[in-house]
Image (cartoon, rainbow, N blue to C red):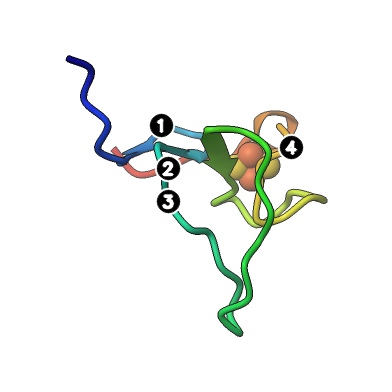
């Protein structure tokens, strides 16, 4: 049987991937619509589609700590 628990995975020099059935909400507690089961959340702060990653971290040279 497949593991259905949600998971959160930070990617080196990139976004945080959230997989599974998780409610995503803004700072006011309002739901943020999602259309995919896996979400890539921006952690570089440069995405134009926050809270989602749009790939800008790569050309910006975003680096995470080891
Ligand atoms: S982490 Fe990808 S745009 Fe910010």
60 displayed left or right of 10: right
Q: Which of the numbered marks, if any, corresponds to residue 42?
A: none
Residue 28 percent across, percent down from the top left: 61, 85
| Residue beneath disc 3 | 22
Check disc 2 and report the residue beneath it: 64
For numbered disc 3, what is the local secondary structure? loop
The reply to whether discs 4 and 1 touch (Cβ–Cβ < 8 Å) is no
**Label 3: few (<14), some (14–19) or many (≥20) C-alpha neighbours in 10 Å:** some
First in residue order: circle 4 vs circle 3: 3
Is label 4 in a helix, a strand or a loop?
loop
Given this view, does label 4 or label 1 mark the residue nearer the observer? 4
Residue at the far front: name it. 1
Ligand 1 under 8 Å from disc 4 Cβ: yes
Estimate the spatial distance between the alpha carbons at disc 4 and disc 2, rounded to whole Å: 17 Å
Q: Nearer the viewer, mark 2 or mark 3?
A: 3
The residue identified by callout 4 is 54
Q: CA distance from mark 2 to mark 3?
A: 24 Å
Query: Residue at (40%, 37%) from the top-left corner?
Result: 20
> Are the two marked residues, 2 and 1, in contact with CB atoms closer than 8 angstroms?
yes
Q: Quadrant of the N terminus?
A: top left
Residue 63 drawn at (x, y percent)? 50, 39
> Which residue bears the numbered disc 1?
12
Q: Of the residues under marks 1 and 3, which one precedes in the sequence?
A: 1
Pointer 4 or 1: first along the chain: 1
């Amino acid at each position: 049987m497949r593991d259905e628990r949600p998971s959160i995975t930070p990617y080196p020099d990139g976004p945080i991937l959230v997989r599974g059935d998780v409610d995503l909400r803004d700072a006011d507690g309002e739901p943020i619509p999602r259309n995919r089961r896996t979400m890539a959340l921006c952690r570089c702060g440069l995405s134009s589609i926050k809270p989602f990653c749009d790939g800008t971290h790569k050309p910006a040279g975003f680096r995470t700590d080891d």
